[in-house]
Image (cartoon, helix red, strand yellow):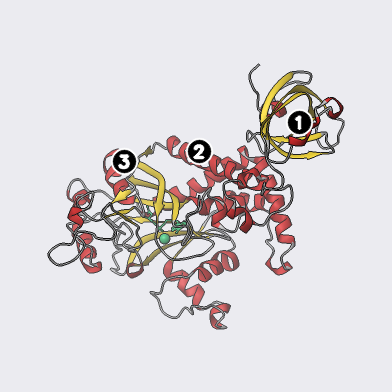
Amino acid sequence: MSNTTVLKILNELKKNQTIEVCGWVKTFRANRFIALNDGSCLENIQCVIDFENTDDNILKKITTGSSVKISGKIVESTGAKQAIEIQVNKINILGESNPDQYPIQPKKHSFEFLRENAHLRTRTSTFNAIMRLRSSLSFAIHKFFNEKGFYYVHTPIITGSDAEGAGEQFRVTTLNPKNPELNSSKNVDFKKDFFGKETKLTVSGQLEAEAYAMSLGKVYTFGPTFRAENSNTSRHLSEFWMIEPEAAFIDINGNMDLAENFLKYILEDITNNNRSELKFLESRLIDEEKRKPEKDRSEMSLIEKINFVIKNKFKRITYSEAIDILRDSKPNRKKKFEYIIKDWGCDLQSEHEKFLVEKHFKCPVIIYNYPASIKSFYMRLNDDDKTVRAMDILFPGIGEIVGGSQREERANVLKKRMREIGIDEKELWWYNDLRKFGTAIHSGFGLGFERLVMFATGMSNIRDVIPFPRTPQNAEF
Ligand code: 4AD
Ligand code: MG
C-alpha cells in the first residue's frame, strides 16, 4: 500500500478504508490520541492508539515532534472536534524527538523565540499557514501574468549596475580580502576581480526587464533582490523577493490600472483557495488584538481587510495633492509628526503614508507624479520639468507595497538626467541603446513580495513571512 496524505484522508477518502500515512506528531494526549500533521494541509488528523496492545517502548517514543508512520482504518470519530479519525493498527517510529530538548512545545511561543528556531518554526500552525499562503500567492502571481500574456524572464542576480542609484549594494568578489591587488592609483583593481569589473548583488531586475519588454512586449521578473541598507525595521529585509512587470506601450495610467488589477487578482485568488489558512490567521490576529488597547485595535478582521482591498477602488492622488492634505492635517498643525511637512519637494515618511491611508482616505492609495529630485533617474519626466511619472501604492498597515513608474523613453532627456545625478553613461550604454533603437513608451513597477505576504497574513513583522530572514547582523540558518 502506498502512503496517503492527511489532506486526502480529510477530503477524499471514505470511512472504513485502510490507509498508511506518515507525518509528525503535534500532540499526544492520554497515551491515546495523536494529532498528526504531514504538511499536506493545515489541519491535523486524530489517530487513536489502542494503548493496551501497544508496546510501552513505542508509546514512550510518541512525543511532540517525532515522525511516525501509521497504518490504520478511517472511522467515524466519537469526539466532538472531528468527524473522522484513524483507528491505529500499527505505528512505526521513524524519527524520535527528545521532549526535553525539542524547542517547539505544544504551547504559545513568542515570535522572537521562533525566529531563533526558524528551522523548526514551520512545525507550528501559524508558520505552517503563513508559508502555505506564501506559496499560494506566488503561484497566483505567475497565473495572473500568464493569463495576461506576460513572459517570465530571469534577470541576473549578479550585476554591474545600480538600478535604484541608492548605493546600497552588497559586493560580489573573489579578490583576497586581506591583500587585494591594487591599481596604479592604489585603489582596489577590480580588473583583477572575477568578472574583470566591480560587481554587486542586484537591487532590482528592472533595467534588464526593460530590455526584454522592448522585444517581448510584456514581461515580468520574480526573484530575490538584495539591499545593504542598515534599517532594522519591521518592514525591511536585506534579502527580499520582488515581482517586477515591465510593459511596452503602456503609460503611467495603464501602469496604475495594471498594478491595481494585479493586487486584486492575487488577493482574490487566496480568498478562494486558502480559506482555512486565512481563517486560522484571522483568529490568531483577533487574539493578538485583544491584548492591545481598544483604540489601537483594527476595525476590520483579516478577511474583511482583504475583501475591502479587492472590492474598493484605490484612491489615486498626485504628490502635490498629498502634500496639501498633509500640510493641513491635524498631526502636522499640532506638530505630532516627527517630520513636519512644510514645502513641496520633501520626501514622504512612513508616518505621512500611514496618515493618508489609515486616517484620511481609509483605503489603499496610489500617489503619482512625484518631484524628480526624490525619485530615480529612469522615471519619465513630465512637461513641467519638475515631476516624474512615478507611482507608489500604499496599503493599510504596510505603507509602500508597490513602487513603479513610466520610464524615460527619450534618449536625450535620459542622458541629461543621468548626468545630473552623476551616473556614468558608459556603465549603462546598453540601457541607453534601448532608447536609440526603436524606443517606445513603457512602464513597470515592483511589488515587494514579503510586504504582500504581511498584508495577506496579518503578520506585523516582515521577518515572520520569509523562511529564513536576512537582516543586518543576522544571517543564521
Ligand atoms: O520602490 P522600490 O525600490 O522600486 C524598485 O526597485 C523599482 N526598480 C521597481 C520597478 O519599478 N520595477 O522597491 C519596490 C518595492 C517597494 O515598494 C517595497 O514593497 C519593496 O519593493 N521593498 C522592500 N521590501 C522588503 N525589504 C526592503 N528592504 C525593501 N525595499 C523595497
Ligand atoms: Mg520605492
Taking the image as shown, residue 208 lies to the left or right of residue 18, namely left
Give the residue drawn at x 63%, y 33%: 40
- Disc 3 beta carbon < 8 A from ligand 1? no
Dot 2 falls on a residue whose secondary structure is helix
Circles 2 and 3 in contact, beta carbons < 8 Å: no
Numbered tag placed on residue 375 in the rendering: none
Ligand 2 in which quarter: bottom left
Numbered tag placed on residue 58 in the rendering: 1
Taking the image as shown, residue 208 lies to the left or right of residue 132, namely left
Q: Residue type at mark 1?
A: Ile
Image coordinates for residue 430, horizontal then vertical, percent? 20, 50
User: According to the image, label 3 marks what residue?
Assistant: 217
Dot 3 falls on a residue whose secondary structure is loop
Inter-mark Cα distance, 2 to 3: 22 Å
Numbered tag placed on residue 139 in the rendering: 2
Disc nearer the start of the sequence (2/3):
2
Who is closer to the viewer here, 474 or 447? 474
